[in-house]
Image (cartoon, rainbow, N blue to C red):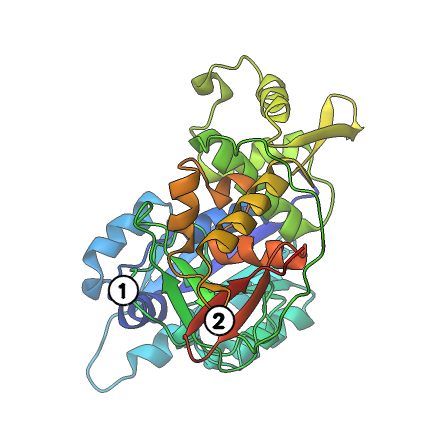
C-alpha cells in the first residue's frame, strides 16, 4: 500500500451546502459521492469540515457517520464568520503540509476564489491539489489553479432534481471533461430512472463525422448492482490513474467505497472467482498483471459497448423527426422501451451524456448542441 496516495480532505462546508441548496434545486448536500470519488484516487487519512455547526444540525450527524472531524467556527457579533473559517482552514492545511510529509494530495472542497493562494502554495510544496465545488457557485479562478477539479453536481451518486435547469460556469482547467467558458447545463428527464438525472453541458455546434462500423446484435447485459459498481470503479480508476488497474487495487477501492463489501455476499468464495465470473459476462477483461495472482483488470473495448452503440444508432434512426434529429432529453427512455435493461452505468459511463459522446467519438452518431432547441441533438448519417 506504500504506493497509494495519502489524501487530506478539507471542506469549506458552508460554501458547499449553500451552493448545493441555492444552485441545485434546493437539494441537500451529501458527502458520500465525494468520499467515493476520492476512494478511487487514494487513501483519505484526514477529513475535516469547517462551519458554524449550529446552522447545520442534520448535516453534522451525516458527516460524523462518515468520520469527518467537525471544526467549529461559531458566529460572533462584529466579526466575519466567513473569513474566520477561511483562515482557520488555510492555516490547518499548511500546517499539515509541513508536518506530514506522507500526505501527497490535498482536497480543498470549496468554490471560493479566496482559497486560490492556498492551492498555489500547496503545489509549490510539491503537493497534488484536487478541488471540489458546486459548478454554478465555483469561481472561475479556482479550477485552473488545481491539479484536478471535480464539480460536485457531476459526481456519481449526486441526483440533481430533474426539473432544474442549471446555467454552468466555465470549467477551465478541470480534471475531467473541460468545457468552454459560459456553457449552460441541463438535466435530462428519465422516467424509467427518476433519480439518475444526467447533467448536460452547452457546447458550440461541432459535429463528429460518422464512420461505418459493424454493429453487434447481442442483447445488452442486465445491469445488476455488482456489475454497475465494478464497471464504474474500474472506469474511475482508469480515468484517475491512467495506469494499470490490478485486482488488488480494485479490491482496495471497492472496500474504500463500501467497507462492508465482500465477494461472499454475492456467492463467490474469492475475489478472483468474482472477477472471472464478470469477465465471462464481458463486464471486464482480465490480463496477466505485474505480479503473479494479481491480474490486470480493464473494461472491454468492444462487445457490449458496441451493442449499446448499435442500439443508440437504431433508436435515433427510428425516432428522428423531419429534420433527421433526435433531442438528447428523453432519448434514454426511448432506448429503454426497446431494451428495458439498458444502463450506460453498467458499461462504465457515469452518465448518459458521456455515453452519447463516446458514441459520437466512435462515429456511430453525430452529436451537436442546438441553441434553438436548447438541447443536444443526435443525428445518423445514411450508410
Q: Is residue 87 visible?
A: yes
Q: Residue at x 45, y 60 (%)?
A: 154
In whole angstroms, how far apart are the C-alphas of marks 1 and 2?
Answer: 40 Å
Disc 2: which residue: 91
Q: Residues within 10 Å of mark 2 (few under 14, many from 20)?
A: few
Does residue 173 lie above or below 279 as drawn? below
Which percent across, then down, holds residue 129?
Answer: 59, 64
Q: Residue furthest front?
A: 322
Tell me the element at label 2.
Answer: helix
Q: Residue furthest top?
A: 269
Q: Earlier in the sequence, mark 1 or mark 2?
A: 2
Q: How many marks?
A: 2
Q: Quadrant of residue 375?
A: bottom left
Q: Residue at x 33, y 70 (%)?
A: 165
Q: Quadrant of residue 84?
A: bottom left
Which percent across, then down, holds residue 91?
Answer: 48, 71
- Of tags 1 and 2, the one toward the viewer is 1
Q: Nearer the viewer, residue 207 or 87?
A: 207
Q: Nearer the viewer, residue 161 or 305?
A: 305
Which percent across, then down, holds residue 382?
Answer: 63, 58
Side of 302 where 155 appears, left or right: left
> Where the N terminus falls, by quadrant?
top right
Q: Nearer the viewer, residue 132 or 154?
A: 154
Which percent across, then down, holds residue 16?
Answer: 36, 67
Q: Which mark is residue 163?
A: 1
Q: Is residue 42 visible?
A: no
Does residue 71 lie above or below 87 as drawn? above
Amino acid at each position: 500500500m506504500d504506493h497509494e496516495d495519502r489524501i487530506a480532505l478539507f471542506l469549506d462546508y458552508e460554501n458547499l451546502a449553500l451552493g448545493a441548496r441555492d444552485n441545485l434545486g434546493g437539494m441537500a448536500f451529501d458527502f458520500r459521492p465525494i468520499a467515493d470519488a476520492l476512494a478511487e484516487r487514494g487513501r483519505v487519512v484526514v477529513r475535516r469540515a469547517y462551519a458554524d455547526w449550529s446552522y447545520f444540525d442534520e448535516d453534522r450527524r451525516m458527516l460524523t457517520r462518515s468520520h469527518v472531524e467537525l471544526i467549529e467556527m461559531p458566529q460572533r457579533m462584529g466579526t466575519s464568520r466567513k473569513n474566520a473559517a477561511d483562515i482557520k482552514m488555510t492555516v490547518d492545511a499548511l500546517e499539515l503540509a509541513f508536518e506530514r510529509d506522507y500526505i501527497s494530495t490535498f482536497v480543498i472542497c470549496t468554490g471560493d476564489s479566496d482559497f486560490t493562494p492556498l492551492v498555489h502554495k500547496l503545489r509549490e510544496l510539491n503537493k497534488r491539489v484536487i478541488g471540489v465545488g458546486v459548478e454554478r457557485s465555483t469561481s472561475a479562478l479556482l479550477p485552473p489553479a488545481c491539479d484536478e477539479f471535480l464539480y460536485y453536481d457531476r459526481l456519481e451518486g449526486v441526483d440533481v432534481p430533474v426539473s432544474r435547469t442549471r446555467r454552468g460556469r466555465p470549467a477551465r482547467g478541470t480534471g475531467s471533461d473541460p468545457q468552454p467558458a459560459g456553457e449552460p447545463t441541463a438535466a435530462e428527464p428519465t422516467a424509467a430512472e427518476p433519480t439518475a438525472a444526467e447533467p448536460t453541458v452547452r457546447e458550440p455546434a461541432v459535429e463528429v463525422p460518422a464512420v461505418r462500423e459493424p454493429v453487434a446484435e447481442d442483447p445488452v447485459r442486465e445491469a445488476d448492482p455488482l456489475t454497475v459498481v465494478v464497471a464504474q470503479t474500474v472506469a474511475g480508476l482508469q480515468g484517475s490513474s491512467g495506469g494499470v488497474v490490478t485486482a488488488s487495487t480494485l479490491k482496495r477501492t471497492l472496500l474504500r467505497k463500501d467497507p462492508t463489501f465482500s465477494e461472499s455476499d454475492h456467492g463467490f468464495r474469492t475475489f478472483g472467482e468474482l472477477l472471472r465470473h464478470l469477465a465471462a459476462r464481458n463486464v471486464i477483461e482480465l490480463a496477466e498483471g505485474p505480479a503473479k495472482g494479481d491480474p490486470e483488470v480493464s473494461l472491454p473495448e468492444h462487445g457490449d459497448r458496441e451493442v449499446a452503440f448499435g442500439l443508440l444508432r437504431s433508436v435515433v434512426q427510428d425516432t428522428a423527426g423531419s429534420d433527421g434529429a433526435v433531442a438528447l432529453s428523453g432519448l434514454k427512455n426511448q432506448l429503454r422501451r426497446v431494451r428495458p435493461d439498458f444502463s450506460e452505468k453498467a458499461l462504465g459511463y457515469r452518465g448518459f451524456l458521456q455515453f452519447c459522446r463516446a458514441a459520437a467519438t466512435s462515429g456511430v452518431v453525430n452529436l451537436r448542441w442546438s441553441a434553438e432547441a436548447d438541447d443536444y441533438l443526435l443525428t445518423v448519417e445514411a450508410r
